[in-house]
Amino acid sequence: MNITEPMFLALTALVDRPRHGYGVVQEVERLSGGRVQLKIGTLYGVLDRLSAEGLVELDREEVQRGRLRRYYRLTDDGAAALQAEAERVAANAAVARTRLRARHVALGGA
């Protein structure tokens, strides 16, 4: 499965506790330092895909102020997928940093 950045951040947002959709949006924005701002429609597409893959699941539903809130939680498979993706991204970043340092040295530190 190809994990996009919004999917990665949504999974990360659910690591510590279940959250409802807007809570995921807020946590993704916080985690990304404001760089990623999910629209609600995009978020539910992401959550539907993660749910279909078994990476997140419905935790509970609550009615608050007359509106239904669905809370999602990370599954064990979701935690494993997030761990694998984090390791893949870290390995790729390490290779890029190494090559950039070598380039810097080859250019005489310019």
Image (cartoon, rainbow, N blue to C red):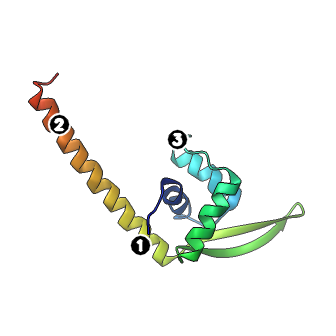
Label 2 SS: helix
Residue 19 position in % (x across, y down) = 65, 63
Q: For mark 2, what is the residue?
A: 101
Q: Residue at x 56, y 69 (%)?
A: 50
User: Which badge, 2 or 3, comes first in the chain's sequence?
Assistant: 3
Q: Residue at x 66, y 75 (%)?
A: 59
Vertical arrangement, residue 56 with respect to residue 32, above or below: below
Q: Indicate the amino acid at tag 1.
A: Ala
Question: Separation of disc 3 and disc 1 at Cα?
Answer: 24 Å
Question: Separation of disc 2 and disc 3 at Cα?
Answer: 26 Å
Q: For mark 3, what is the residue?
A: 33
User: Which badge, 2 or 1, comes first in the chain's sequence?
Assistant: 1
Label 1 SS: helix
Q: Nearer the viewer, residue 81 or 76?
A: 81
Label 3 SS: loop
* Side (left or right) of 107 relative to 22: left
Asked if the residues shown at circle 3 and circle 1 are in contact, with their CB atoms under 8 angstroms apart, the answer is no
Total marks shown come to 3
Q: Indicate the amino acid at tag 3.
A: Gly
Residue 54 position in % (x across, y down) = 54, 78
Q: For mark 1, what is the residue?
A: 80
